[in-house]
Image: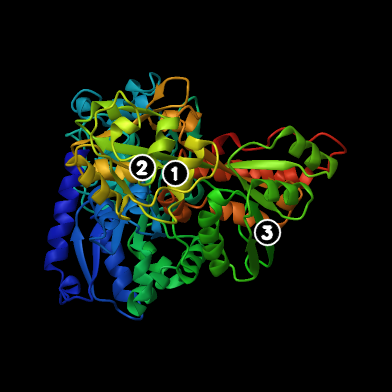
Amino acid sequence: MTSLKRLIGLCVLIALVISPALSLAQDDTAITVVGSGIAAPLFQALVDASADSANVNTEITGTSAGLERLCAGSADIALSTRAITDAEAAACVEASINFVELLLGDEAAVIIAHPQDDFAQCLTAANLDTIFAPSAAGQVTTWQAVNPEAAVALSISVPPADSPITALFDSIVGGDGLRADATVETDEQAIIRNVAGTSGALGVVNYVTAAAAGDAVKILPIDTGGGNCVDPNAGTIASGQYPASERIYAYANSALLDNPQAAALLGFLGTEPAANIAADQSFLAASADELARNAGIVAERLTGRQFSAAPFNFVIPQGLVGALSFAGDSAGSDLFKTITSTFQQAYPGVTPTVNMLGRIDGTRRFCNGEVDAITMTAPLTEEQSANCAANNVVPVDFEIGHQAVVMVANAQNDYLACLTTAQVATVWGAASEGSIMTWDQVDPAFPATNLTLLAPGEGDEVTDLMLTDAAGVSTPVRDDAVTNRDPAYRAASVAVVDGGLTYMSWGQYQTVVNRGQTGIQLVSVDSGAGCVAPSDATIADGSYPLGQSLKLTVSQLALRRPEVQSFVWYLYGDSNFATIAGSGYTGIALTDLPAIREGLQAVYDAAAAATPPAAEPTPDATPTSAG
């Protein structure tokens, strides 16, 4: 199978090189298209037919390499014979590249049989291997190999080995390639004729070709397991239920939509003429609904997996209007100001109000029914829960992630391998400014080495988190540290300075390490129960002392309103992952988001069905996938 794919790509590449249609001048404004050699001819036909013919340079790289280049920012469009994977989408997010996912059509390889052959029925995976695998050549010559009662000669007709249909069919058959004694026909109509005129014959052709043959042949279903025989048709192919099928996608950098010619080309993919071109190229054309979705994706710049993501019932309504109100801990204020701002830009009919004056003020207003939602870094107290219950306010929690500040020290300073929270407060607290200048003043057991402290400067959120968790109260940081906003600079400085220490978010530390910084060590922290090193696990379970979890707690009554539902849905959209991760929150991966959104639907349904409680609040209704 792998060698066939490579051969197909090479053949299509040669065809594209000699094709005048692709001999376009290469210049700075050209659109770079990479990816699947199977999809490239279809895409070029669409380019040629679009009203505003764009300048396109195409390079056949294969699907995986094409998507890698798209997410690395070195290509504008990647053509693909499969959906982008979670890992590939995460790479795009990490590179701050938003993509639009557009459907070009579908392709399927089907098995055809003589219409009167009743013994030719649904074929299992084992049947396919028995009939079509390379090992069957010269050995399996009658139908008795799969049906002992059918003493009929078996003959096989297939397209050439470099055909996309052969490669697609080979993907569900064991071994590399198909049996060598099969009759090879370059014209699929010849395969149709062979099968239609010969009892016991089987052929492999494109679904579009087989469907056009009508009653001349019959198309065989394939057993996907446990007797589940799937007939190839538009529905089973589009949904992926039929195994020998693939969706043909174009993934485009959303920035391309700022180019008028490129936007016109991508918009053309949502028109009926585009579907006709796909059909002319022997692809199963996108349906009217899929074309409309293509058009909507381009018009509204909808990024992320609009076709390949799991289907959900909830859709943010067009022309959404309403108001949202948020209060709560200041810890999440910057994050929520950013997300509510972008939400309002996308849905200008909604007016959000973010007024986070602290936990006490936020919970009071929330439990009194004055605001829709609050951000929380700690659970409601018994008193606060009782106040909510008295006012028939049912809190529904949504996990945002875990945030932690970590300290980074010079790797040679063994005494900095672990610090107590009291020592952290002593080192960084404003009260130590000008007085605690050497490490033995922090602890007599430490050497009399000068403290060399590097901090991010005023207004950094992790500073408040570190000192609040270390000292137990919000306290200012000392003002005599060297300040620099770049965590990489601070880490590099610490690496070469004896007694050097800095701090940063856990996410920033990961970036520093991924860049190959050496000469540094992570500092463990002891809050009284022993030294705990920061890690994804210790931050998530709360055992690492300098961290916290952030939740959005929403009133169940508010969750009945479309603007509140839409905001929570938007919050867990793929496009916001980078914003949340960039704010230092971990614990939810990009790959978790589809499951979280699926869980939201159940929460919304429960909110719609619920009646306000008379007394005690209901149990936490957070979807398990969001935890």
Please, is residue 347 above or below residue 305 in the view? Answer: below
- Is residue 496 visible in the rendered image? The answer is yes
Q: Of label 2 and label 3, which has the lower sequence position?
A: 3
Q: Quadrant of residue 406?
A: top left
Q: Position of residue 263 (x, y in %)?
A: 38, 74
Per the image, label 2 sits on a secondary structure element best described as loop
Measured from the top left, where is residue 600 in percent x and y? 62, 44
Spatial separation of the CA atoms under disc 2 and disc 1 = 8 Å
Residue topped by disc 2: 435
> Which one is nearer the viewer's eye here, 99 or 508?
508
Observer-nearest of 460 and 562: 460
Dividing the picture into quadrants, the one containing residue 598 is top right
Q: Residues within 10 Å of mark 1 (few under 14, many from 20)?
A: some
From the viewer's side, name the closer residue of 593 and 452: 452
Looking at the image, is 128 positioned above or below residue 342? Answer: above
- Residue at x 64%, y 67% (from the top left corner): 350
The kind of secondary structure element at disc 3 is strand
| CB-based contact (under 8 Å), mark 1 and mark 3 | no
For label 3, the residue is 325
Q: Are marks 2 and 1 in contact (CB under 8 Å)?
A: yes
In percent of width and height, residue 130 lies at 30, 25
The outermost residue toward the right is 614
* Kind of residue indicated by mark 2: Ser
Residue 527 shown left or right of residue 388 in the figure: left
Q: Give the structural element (helix, strand or loop) at label 1.
A: helix
* Three-letter code for the amino acid on which mark 3 is drawn: Ser
Q: Amino acid at mark 1?
A: Ala
Pinpoint residue 37: horizontal percent, then vertical percent.
23, 55
Point out which mark residue 431 bears: 1
